Image (tube, helix red, strand yellow):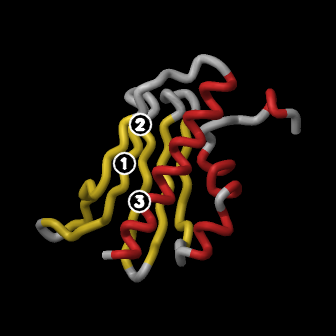
Amino acid sequence: MKNEDYDYNNPFNIVEKIKPELENRGVGIKDIQYDKNVFGSWIIKFSMDGSEYRFHWDGKNSWLMLEVIVMKKGHDDWEDLELFKHNQGARTKKAEMERERYIIEKMLVALDKLKQE
C-alpha cells in the first residue's frame, strides 16, 4: 500500500501497528468501532489486568479519552480516566500522520500509567 493510500486514524490500522506493544502490556482487544463519516470517531474496547477499558477518539474535537467501565446504580457505565486534547487539524497527509503518531503515543502513555496503578 502506498503511503498516500494509508487510512490514518483508522483504529484497526492503529491496533495493528502497535500490536506488539499492546501484547507486552497484557492488553486484550475486545471490540473496535469506527465511523469515518462521523468525523472519524472511534472506540477501541479492551481488557487489561481484569478490568474493562476503552479508548474513545472524538474526531470532531480531536480528543482521546481513556475510560473504565464501572457499575453505577445497577448498570455498567463508562468513567473517564484520562483526556488528551490534540490541538491541530489534519488537513494534509503530513498532519494526519502527526495526529496518528500523537494518538499512539498517548495511548501507550495511558496504558503504562494503568500498569503502574
Depth check, mark 3 against mark 2: the one in front is 3
Q: Which mark is residue 54?
A: none
Q: Is mark 1 on a helix, strand or loop?
A: strand
Q: Residues within 10 Å of mark 2 (few under 14, many from 20)?
A: some
Kindly identify which numbered label has been placed on residue 110: 3
Q: Do the residues labelled 1 and 2 touch (CB within 8 Å)?
A: yes
**Looking at the figure, which quarter contains the N terminus?**
top right
Q: What residue type is labelled 1?
A: Met
Q: In which quarter of the image is the C terminus?
A: bottom left
Image spot of residue 8 (x, y percent): 66, 36
Which mark is in front, 1 or 3? 3
Q: Gap in Å between the C-alphas at discs 1 and 2?
A: 8 Å
In front of the other: 105 or 72: 105
Quarter assignment of residue 24: bottom right
Secondary structure beneath dot 2 equals: strand
Disc 3 is placed on an element classified as helix
| Residue positioned 33% across, 57% down in the render | 67
| Above-or-below relation of 112 to 94 | below
**Quadrant of the image occupied by residue 3:** top right
Query: Which residue corresponds to mark 1?
Result: 65
The span from disc 3 to disc 2 (Cα, nearest Å) is 17 Å
- Mark 2 highlights which residue? 58
Whole-percent x and y of residue 89?
50, 21
Please determine whether, in this image, residue 103 is positioned above or below residue 37.
below
Q: For the residue marked with disc 3, what is the amino acid?
A: Ala
Instruction: Give the mark nearer the N terminus: 1 vs 3.
Output: 1
The span from disc 1 to disc 3 (Cα, nearest Å) is 10 Å
Left/right placement of residue 67 relative to residue 8 reads left
